[in-house]
Amino acid sequence: MKRLLMVDDDDAVRRLIRLSLADCFEVIDTAEPEQAFTLALEHKPDAILLDLRMPRYSVESRCRAFRDGSARATILAKQKM
């Protein structure tokens, strides 16, 4: 089963998405954006769903971390296997 990493500070949204996608994805989620990169390295998700309106965190910095960081290389390496 494919894995989805979901990063959203709203518990209700995370529950709704988890219930909606549970048949298609193993959903790993967090309300804490600073945990997202670690979870991506640990679980190597096939997709990442990132809330764009989280307080205290710049969307640009989170996207840049995934795009430029080693999590991206690890995830891409997994997809090529």
Image (cartoon, rainbow, N blue to C red):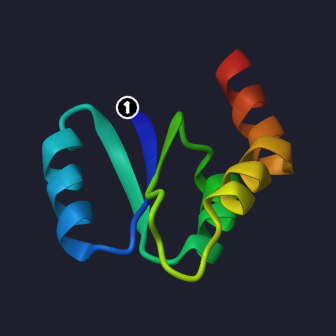
The residue that mark 1 highlights is: 1
Q: Would you say 41 lies left or right of 27 here?
A: right
Establish if 66 lies above or below 38. Answer: above
Residue 41, by quadrant, is bottom right
Residue 19 location in percent, x, y? Answer: 14, 51
- Residue at image point 43% right, 44% down: 4
Residue 48, given in percent of the width and then of the height, sits at 51, 44
Which residue type does callout 1 highlight? Met
Point 68% across, 59% down: residue:
62
- Quadrant of the image occupied by residue 59: bottom right
Q: What percent of the width, then of the height, locates residue 9? A: 38, 74
Q: Is residue 61 left or right of residue 20?
A: right
The residue furthest bottom is 56
**Quarter of the image where the N terminus is located:** top left
Check disc 1 and report its element: helix, strand or loop.
Answer: loop
Q: Nearer the viewer, residue 13 or 40?
A: 13
Seen in the image, is 41 located left or right of residue 44?
Answer: right
Residue 81 is at least partly visible in this image: no
